[in-house]
Image (tube, rainbow, N blue to C red):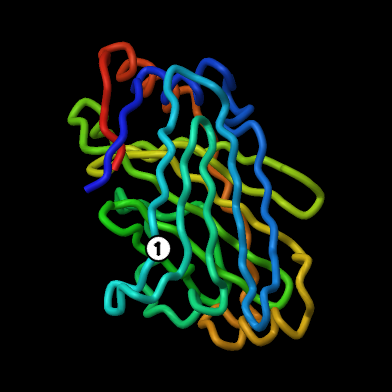
Amino acid sequence: MRVFHFVVIGVIAVGLQSCGLGKGVVEKVSVATTQEGESVYVDLKADLKKAGFTLPPLTLPLVDPKRPERKLGEIVTNGYTIQVRVNANEVVKFPVADGSKLPNGDVVPVTLSQGQVPIAIPVLGSNSRVYFAMNSSQIMIGTAVTILKEDRLNLPVNLFFPFTASEQITGTAGFFLGALQGIGVFALYEKPAVTTSAMARISTATRTVEAPRISIRSEAVSSAKIRRLERTADSLSGELSLD
């Protein structure tokens, strides 16, 4: 198992002290698409607001558990940055895991119409996941990066802050706590810069085809949630391991 360490006070402070009640936990988010032959690659880059922790330089592969030689993409962490890359053509062929849930079992902050759910891809050697969905005019890419269990953070609380990165890119980012805990970033890219034919080829290969629309689900950031997390943060010190 690959782990790295950060100060838990910092990871909560980035969402509480630096943002008040809603300015967010990310400094900058970008989504890009590139075409390489018949394949379309989707890249998410999220720069976190600076706090009392940094992420080590790690590259964690996304693979098909049934065929580990088949690489679907990767997660890269470094400093305050999380990057995700997926091969959209390959990801939509992946046996669909339950992409409707965060690692802690709560509902992901993303909604698809017609009862569809995102594709969930496990991160090799960890409880973290990457999420993907698309139709002919939208791409959703996200990740939930888990920390190793800390009993004092075992609260059934999620705290996500919506963001607007550009006219085309919106999303939400924050923390999920409970049996599994960590940081989540979900971005929605409207009218991505790839050819219509390439989008159509991929969208017809996935269960999230054509008609289902994708939207970011907003949840009120209540003062009660903030107070619960602040009380928990006040009782913590030292380091946790991130899975």
Q: What residue is at 37 percent from the left and 80 percent from the top?
A: 95
Residue located farthest toward the right when viewing the structure as drawn = 167
Query: How far across and how far down the image is residue 153, in percent?
Result: 26, 29
Residue 210 sits in quarter: bottom right
- Residue 148, position in %: x, y? 24, 38
Q: Is residue 58 left or right of residue 238?
A: right
When the figure is inspected, residue 101 is found, relative to residue 2, above or below; the finding is below
In this rendering, is residue 76 above or below 9? below
Residue in the image at 62% along x and 63% along y: 42
Q: Which one is in front, 194 or 101?
A: 194
Q: Secondary structure at mark 1?
A: strand
Three-letter amino acid code of the residue under disc 1: Leu
Using the image as rendered, state which of residue 181 and residue 1 is in the foreground.
Answer: 1
Residue 3 image offset from top left, x and y in percent: 27, 39
Residue 84 x/y as whole percent: 52, 54
The answer to whether residue 35 is above or below residue 102 is below
State which quarter of the image contains the C terminus.
top left
Kindly identify which residue carries mark 1.
62
- From the viewer's perspective, is 103 left or right of 44? left
Q: Residue at x 78, y 66 (%)?
A: 193
The one nearer the camera, 135 or 106, is 135
